[in-house]
Image: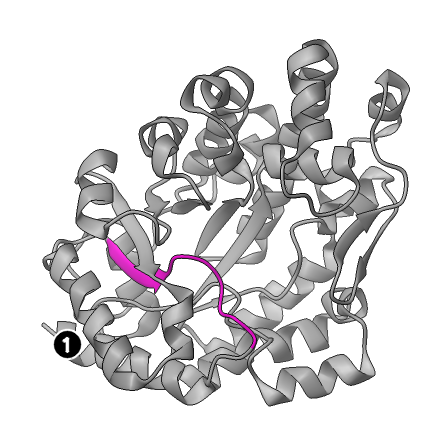
Amino acid sequence: MEAMQHYTATSTAKTPPPHTGVARFLDACYHRQPDATPVWFMRQAGRCLAEYRALRQKYDMLTMVKTPELSTEVTLMPVKTFGVDAAIIYSDILTPLEAMGVSFEIRHEVGPLIHHPIRNQQDVENIRIPNGPEIAPYMMQAIQMVRREVEGKQAVIGFAGAPFTMACYLIEGRPSRDYRNAKAMMYSQPELWHALMEKLTTVTQSYLGEQVQAGVDAVQLFDSWVGALSPSVYERYVQPYVRRIFDSVKQTGIPAIHFGTGTSALLESMTAAGGDIIGLDSHVELDEGWERVGFEHGVQGNLDSILLLTEWPVIESAMRDVLKRAANRPGHIFNLGHGVLPPTNPDLLRQLVEAVHAETQR
């Protein structure tokens, strides 16, 4: 909690001008009725866009992430192309690791690779806890540049990886199907596990605090791999750390989104951990998930990403089903259950944004 006190005094809930994307988005976050349902897409800045692929031919991903001008350019692509209500900063959840003294790379078609995975107590002790300004200053520059470009018309979303997902990457060393090494450490060496989670939590609090200071309107915590756990295991080994992060963000007055995949069994436990908006993936019906989360919370989701590989009539029908289940309640942010897939036709994404706005205009 101490890491966030620097940000508390100057942060207040924002009241934007009406009838803008940022107004729609923040109205949903604060449980006010927006003029239309806000829309954005996870992984919207990239893979399905020809302009992004052209940049990737010239630069590797980490170069783009660490170059504020390039990060800004990619962040704004979906705003200009799709008309979404929010821009999420182009970066990667592993970005803070560099300041923590962890060497990694992002290999094309493989994903993140940790050069020296965590195996013992000394490995955990070697991880440093940087001061807030040391953590990805280039991302903070990109946030400021994006804010200037959107001119208050779209919300700017910052993000971080949640401690469990980050720990899995650090221990596995690469993407995994079953997270066997991480879970084995968690079960058999709980003291080592908790020492690692403590460090990751402290850094994540500072990292999100820096993003708030740089000017984001909201943050999203990605716990992409947490669906591998049962509720009791989550509550014992993960929930306390996530709660600390959301408690810290709450002090800033900035709304927070709590997202995971494969989390149908964890919705109640994740809601208890915190977040103003709970992400629902495509494995749960939106109305059932929202009832479990509690209607006093907002929800984000949850069109199946695969539907965007079909034809518009199929997408439109599924979109209307999601909106019907949302039932015009305040607090719904329209999104996918997971990220945009590379083969997605950008024209369909633009059409989807326009249709959601038209169907829900109030």
Instruction: Name the residue at 45% across, 25% down.
Output: 230
Query: For mark 1, does the 10 Å Cα neighbourhood hold few (<14), some (14 to 19), or many (20 or more) residues?
Result: few
Q: Position of residue 199 (x, y in %)?
A: 71, 26
Q: Secondary structure at mark 1?
A: helix
Residue occupying image coordinates x 63% and y 80%:
73
Q: Which residue is mark 1?
A: 359
On screen, residue 168 versus residue 147, left or right, reads right
Residue at 28 percent of width and 67 percent of height: 38
Taking 312 as reference, is 227 left or right? right
223 lies above or below 18: above
Residues 8 and 305: in front is 305
Q: Nearer the viewer, residue 15 or 186?
A: 186
Q: Quadrant of the C terminus?
A: bottom left
Relative vertical location of residue 315 with respect to residue 112 in this rendering, above or below: below
- Boundaries of the magenta span: 332-342
**Between residues 209 and 76, which one lies in front from this camera angle?**
76
**Relative image position of residue 164 (x, y in whole percent):** 60, 32
Question: What residue lies at 41% left-to-right and 23% top-to-bottom?
Answer: 231
Residue 46 x %, y % = 59, 75
Q: Which quadrant, please, contains the N terminus?
A: top right
Three-letter amino acid code of the residue under disc 1: Glu
Which scheme is used to colour this image of the protein?
A: one colour
Q: Measuring from the top left, give residue 357's x and y in whole percent.
A: 22, 77
Where, by quadrant of the figure, is residue 232 drawn? top left
Q: From what the image shows, is residue 20 above or below residue 105?
A: below
